[in-house]
Image (cartoon, rainbow, N blue to C red):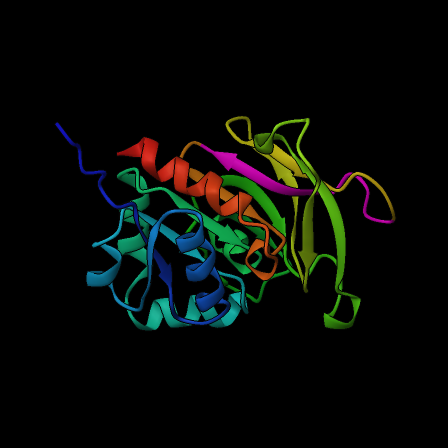
Amino acid sequence: MSFVTKPIRIAVLALQGGVREHVQALNAAGADAFPAKNLEQITMAMGLVIPGGESTTMIKLAQMYNLVEPIQELRSQGMPMYGSCAGMIMLADRLEGGIVGQETIGGIDVLVRRNAFGRQTESFEAPLRLQNLGVESEPFPGVFIRAPFVVEVGENVEVVGAIESGAHAGRVVAVQSGNLMATSFHPELTPDIRVHEIFVNIVRKAQ
């Protein structure tokens, strides 16, 4: 008897930002990934990725298309979600350095500082040891572009990555809370698909 494995369908919120790169990385990690611009497309998925981009633009577009509350409802129903860079800001419960009244989707009990590492010209790369990759694994190539970092972590949030050395040593840059995961760096801009593999597994286990 043969068994057919159910495709792991993951939507990438396609309002603004690095959508194509996330879709490619997720597909390479074994998912059936696709861009989603509306609620109907999002609800076809088992998980949602919120990409990097410009967080104020992204939330304004989400509000314009009436997506904020429906995505919050899907999150509360247990849909796994992963946010990178601006996506981390979108999934944070609390925000520092945002524009007045800037809304988030929320779900992860953290305080995130927007543009915490400086301007575009201060972008950098740093090798990271991520706990959910295993302590013996090779460091992950962290790419930081106008990135946030986590200032405060709630009791139900696990820190899974921090910068180990240099001027930014100790800064928390990856967190997980149940089915929600966020990184302040851009794994989709590297050929390393391990972070996307982690999220695909989170989605698979949630089914």
User: Can you give x and y, in whole percent of width and height, for residue 154 in the image?
Assistant: 56, 32
User: Can you give x and y, in whole percent of width and height, for residue 100 in the image?
Assistant: 55, 66
| Quadrant, the C terminus | top left
Image check: 99 left or right of 146?
left
- Give the farthest residue toward the left: 1
The answer to whether residue 131 is above or below residue 199 is above
Along the line of sight, the residue nearer the viewer: 49 or 103 = 49
Along the line of sight, the residue nearer the viewer: 111 or 179 = 179
Q: Quadrant of residue 134?
A: top right
User: Can you give x and y, in whole percent of width and height, for residue 95 in the image?
Assistant: 57, 52
Along the line of sight, the residue nearer the viewer: 147 or 129 = 129
The answer to whether residue 91 is above or below residue 114 is above
Along the line of sight, the residue nearer the viewer: 93 or 193 = 193
Residue ID at (19%, 62%): 40
Q: Is residue 20 magenta?
A: no
The answer to whether residue 43 is above or below residue 101 is above
Camera sees residue 16: yes
Residue ID at (68%, 27%): 136
Residue ID at (36%, 67%): 62
Q: Is residue 175 magenta?
A: yes
Image check: 16 left or right of 6?
right
Residue ID at (60%, 42%): 174
| Quadrant, the N terminus | top left
Image check: 23 left or right of 77?
right
User: Can you give x and y, in whole percent of width and height, for residue 118 in the image?
Assistant: 76, 64
- Give the farthest residue toward the right: 166
Residues shaded magenta:
167-177
